[in-house]
Structure formats: C-alpha cells, structure tokens
Image: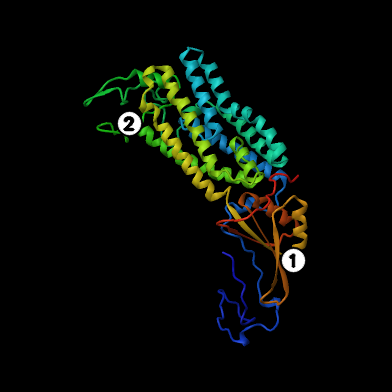
Amino acid sequence: MAKIATKKPNKNVKEKTHKFNFSFSSKSQPESFNKNNYDTVNLKAGTIKFGRFYGKKSLKYRLIVSIVIGIVMAFVIQLTLKNTGLYNSGLMAVVQGIARITQASMGNAGINAKITTLIFNLLFWGLYFILNIPLFVFSFKKIGKTFTLITIVFVFINTVVGLGISYIPNIDHIFIFGNTVPAGETHDLGQPVYPWTPYDHIGTETFPNPLSNLFAQKGVYVIPFDFNGDNWQVFNPDYDPYKAVMLFIYALVYGLISAICYACLYIVGGCTAGGDFVSIYYSINKHKPLGGLMIIVNGLCLLIGAITGSYISAGIIDKAGFNWQFLLSANLVASVIYVVVFGILLNHFYPLHQMVKVEIMSEKINTIKNYLFANNYTHSMSINKMTGAYTGKNKDMLWTVCLYVETPNIIRLIRKVDDKATILISTVRGVDGTFKIYRQGSEQ
C-alpha cells in the first residue's frame, strides 16, 4: 500500500505512522514549501487490471507476451475444449464443428483411424489460421501493422503448438476434472460400458446401449441433456449426467483462463483474430462500437459449431442421433455458459467498448501533447491551468476522452516523454458529441 506524504511534525522523531492535522487555522498552513518535509511516493492505479503490461514496452516485449499467451492457450484449448467436447465462440466454434463432423464422417466411412486423426487435428488447429489470412491482410491495411503483426504471431504460435501437442502420447486421455467422453466407452479401459442414456432404461432396469458406445467409438462428443426421474446419476463418473456436470466446470475454468489471457493480449496491442478484427475496426475506425452485435454473431457461430460438431455428427453415425436431447446437448449448454462467463470476465479485465477519461499531470505537458499529435492521436484534448496547493506554483493538466482499448498505447506514448507523469483513468458513463478516434496499431 502506498504511503501518503504528510508533513512531519518533528524531524528528530521517526514515526511509523502518519499523523494528520485537520486544523484549518492559517497557522497550520505552510508559509513556504520545504521539500525536506515531504516524501515522494509512487502511486499505482488499482483499477487498471494487469497494470504491468501497460507503459513503455518495446515491440520485442509485446511479441514475447503474445508468444507466451499463444503457448499457454494451446495447452488450455487442448485440455478444456478438444479433450472434453466443449466449444469455443466465434469463428473458432465453426472450425471446431467442421473438424468434428469431418472426423465423424471419416470414421463412419471406415477410413483408417490414423488418417482420420491427422485430418481432424489439421482442421481443428490449422483451419482457423487459414481462414484468417484474408482478415490479416484486411487488418494490415485498415487497422495497423504492429497490431496485425502481434495478432499473427499469437495465432501462428497457438496453431503450431496446438498441432504439436496433439501428438503427445495419451494427451487426449487427460481430463483434469473428470472424463467427459460420452458414456459408451471409457478411455482408461478401452472397453465399452453401458450406463444410462435416454434409450436404455425401462423402469428400474438398465440395458446395454450400443448407440452410445458407437458415438464414442466414432469420436462424436455429444452428451444428452436429460436429468429426470431415476436418472440422476450425477455422482457416478461412468454416467452421462456426471459427465455433463464436469462439462460445466470445464466451461467455467476455460472462461476464466481465456478472459485473463486474452485481456493481456489486448493490452499489448493484439487480438484473437476472427471477429475481433471486424469489431475493433468498426469500433476504432468507424466510431461504432459493436459489442452487442458481436455477442449475437459469436452466439450464432457457437450454435453452428455445436450443432454441426455434435448433433449432426451423431445423426451421421446413426439416425437415432437426430433427437432433441442430442440437439440441446450438455455440450451446447456448457458452451453457452462459457461464452457468458468469458464475456463478463473479459469486460471486467479489459472493457473493449468502454469510454474513459484520461488525465495527465506532468511538467512536460506541451511536449506530451505534441508527441501524441505526432503519433496520430486525434482525439480532442484540453489543458487546464492549476496551482499547486503546497508549492503555489502554476501547473498544467492535459485531459482527453477515448476508448479504454486505446489507453495502453496512450500510456506507452506518455511514458516515452515523461516516466514520472501522473496518469489518472476514470470511467465515462456516457458521451454526447463527436470526436475522432486513434487508429490502433498505427505506431511503428
């Protein structure tokens, strides 16, 4: 906790705590400023999440951060999405659906298992990068070179590392919280088991269900969302209801980890590609925040991915899979939970469409102002004249209103001019008027 600078009543006495004089008589006010009576402290704004990633950071540092995030997210996606049957949002969800339905089709056609696995991994990890190539070109021309470079590095590393770890022996059998493979098969034993599904119970008796086993063998990850009557087997890891609960836990964990990692990626000047390019372009260049629209688009992509990868894949294996319990599967419900958790946490860590007021106090205000203009910062800025309460000296404060997404770059520019400047950032609840917005990533 930062110490507050206060006047020391006695130079010969060292006090562990600060005392405050609340007397307002003229005698209590200092007649002149004596720097020996005051301490200089460094204050950090606690409202800025992941503050260490802000400030004057080199391009090399930012690229290293994007590489680390790409590696971390590759392992996270493998363990919480690919292994479990959970779905991402946005374009990645569509890619997952394509990969899973291709795997189901090839498996159902009797194609060699090794070839099927190879194609599945190439699609799951590589197709996302390929589909983003036109968007990389768009971002390079319309948003900024540095922004695009950081994003490409992240997506490329995530793709290569993800594809590599897919071939670590038994990586697909690792379940951190619980096995979520449909209950027709257990990975540990490699033998079919026949627990409850919507088709195998009559009264209190349970019968073998070859359909559930068939789905699991063909790599179709779909858990029917059916909890009623005597079918609450949520405490037995061999049964689908238990596996559905595990899916919900994976959704919460993935939502938390991905929100933290992607917030850091945004801060260093990159994004996750896909729909982010469109959202950021319109938010910054067209002055139209698309937060609400992107939520709808990402949700539709999630539905397409989950229905394609689980529901239609199950129907390809057997027509009995075209059932409402497989349509509204636990995989789909858990994925929706992930999207909600991720959206809430990301908005908390890094509010992409939030307007903020930035106030800068420095002895180099004019230099900072000119440097911001020279680096394509085109928001309106104002300079207020102030008088220091203790020193009685005249001071200047520069303030401006911008998007929260722009603050990392603004702080970096200010720190290049004055490392000791005090920067205050406060939330703006609403703005009525017009102003220009800095083109993110245009810095070299």
| Disc 1, SS | loop
Looking at the image, the residue that sits furthest to the top is 110
**Relative vertical location of residue 41 with respect to residue 49 in this rendering, above or below:** below
Q: Residue at x 64, y 64 (%)?
A: 42
Colour setting: rainbow
- Which quarter of the rendering shows the N terminus? bottom right
Mark 2 or mark 1: which comes first in sequence? 2
Expressed as whole percent of the image width and height from the top left, the position of residue 307 reads 45, 27
Expressed as whole percent of the image width and height from the top left, the position of residue 359 reads 65, 61
Give the total of numbered labels.
2
Q: CA distance from mark 2 to mark 1?
A: 66 Å
Question: Would residue 308 appear left or right of 422 to someone viewing this image?
Answer: left
What type is the residue that disc 2 sits on? Asp
| Disc 2, SS | loop
Comparing 406 with 26, the one in front is 406
Residue on which the image places disc 2: 226
Q: Does residue 167 appear in the picture of this structure?
A: no
What type is the residue that disc 1 sits on? Glu
**Relative vertical location of residue 85 with respect to residue 412 in this rendering, above or below:** above
Question: Would residue 268 appear left or right of 234 to someone viewing this image?
Answer: right
How crowded is the residue under tag 1: few (<14 C-alpha within 10 Å), some, or many (20+)?
some
Q: Quadrant of residue 223?
A: top left
Q: Residue at x 58, y 76 (%)?
A: 15
Q: Residue at x 43, y 32 (%)?
A: 332
**Relative vertical location of residue 391 with respect to residue 105 in this rendering, above or below:** below
Q: Which mark is residue 363?
A: 1
Comparing 398 with 68, the one in front is 398
Q: Does residue 440 appear in the picture of this structure?
A: yes
Q: Are marks 2 and 1 in contact (CB under 8 Å)?
A: no
Q: Residue at x 35, y 30 (%)?
A: 240
Comparing 40 with 297, the one in front is 297
Expressed as whole percent of the image width and height from the top left, the position of residue 356 reads 60, 56
